[in-house]
């Protein structure tokens, strides 16, 4: 099986508070062919610090029904080490979800690069908050900068 670029997304839910928007948003990405879910795990850390990991098949009927149609085949690529690493990031009485997904939208572009003998030398995901802060900084400095001599005002 040839995969496109694969990413691991980890989200935290403080206080074990889940909202229903995540399933439908992920469903939109899967149905549009943007991503393909290749593994999914849920982790809960109790108030006492006990770690409980659940795979899709371990979920209650509501959780299973929400996420099962989004996963065509669980690969089992997420390991016990991944569970422990995420559990170490969680405070007591919180949960996390690990989502391993293929960027199917990028597969054709990746193949085109390979066919052209191009070499990918860098790719980096820039967090949304970093981009927002950079744009805000840029806007503030543009307002504060004096106009260049001869520049149209």
Image: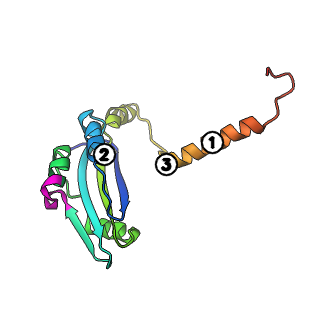
Which tag is nearer the camera, tag 1 or tag 3? 1
Mark 1 sits on what residue? 136
- Left or right of 119: which side holds 31? left
Q: Badge 2: few (under 14), some or many (20 or more) residues near its Cα, within 10 Å?
A: few
Tag 1 and tag 3, C-beta contact below 8 Å? no
SS of the residue under disc 1: helix
The disc, 1 or 2, on the residue closer to the chain's N-terminal end is 2
Q: Badge 3: few (under 14), some or many (20 or more) residues near its Cα, within 10 Å?
A: few
Residue at 21% from the left image edge and 64% from the top image edge: 54
> Residue 118 at what x, y percent from top left?
44, 36
**Span colored in magenta:** 55-62
Tag 1 and tag 2, C-beta contact below 8 Å? no
| Number of numbered discs overlaid on the protein picture | 3
Mark 3 sits on what residue? 127
| Residue 10 part of the magenta segment | no
> Residue 23 at what x, y percent from top left?
26, 46
| Image quadrant containing the N terminus | top left
Quick check: 48 above or below 133? Answer: below
Mark 2 sits on what residue? 21
Q: Main secondary structure of the magenta part?
A: helix
Which tag is nearer the camera, tag 3 or tag 2? 2
Q: Which mark, by number, is residue 117?
A: none
- Left or right of 91: which side holds 128? right
């Amino acid at each position: 099986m040839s995969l496109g670029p694969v990413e691991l997304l980890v989200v935290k839910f403080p206080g074990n508070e889940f909202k229903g928007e995540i399933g439908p948003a992920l469903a939109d990405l899967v149905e549009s062919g943007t991503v393909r879910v290749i593994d999914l795990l849920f982790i809960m850390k109790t108030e006492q610090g006990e770690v409980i990991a659940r795979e899709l098949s371990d979920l209650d009927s509501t959780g299973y029904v929400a996420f099962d149609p989004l996963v065509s085949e669980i690969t089992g690529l997420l390991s016990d080490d991944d569970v422990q690493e995420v559990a170490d990031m969680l405070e007591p009485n919180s949960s996390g979800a690990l989502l391993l997904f293929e960027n199917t939208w990028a597969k054709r572009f990746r193949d085109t690069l390979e066919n052209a003998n191009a070499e990918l030398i860098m790719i980096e995901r820039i967090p949304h908050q970093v981009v927002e802060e950079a744009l805000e900084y840029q806007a503030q400095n543009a307002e504060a900068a004096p106009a260049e001599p001869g520049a149209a005002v």
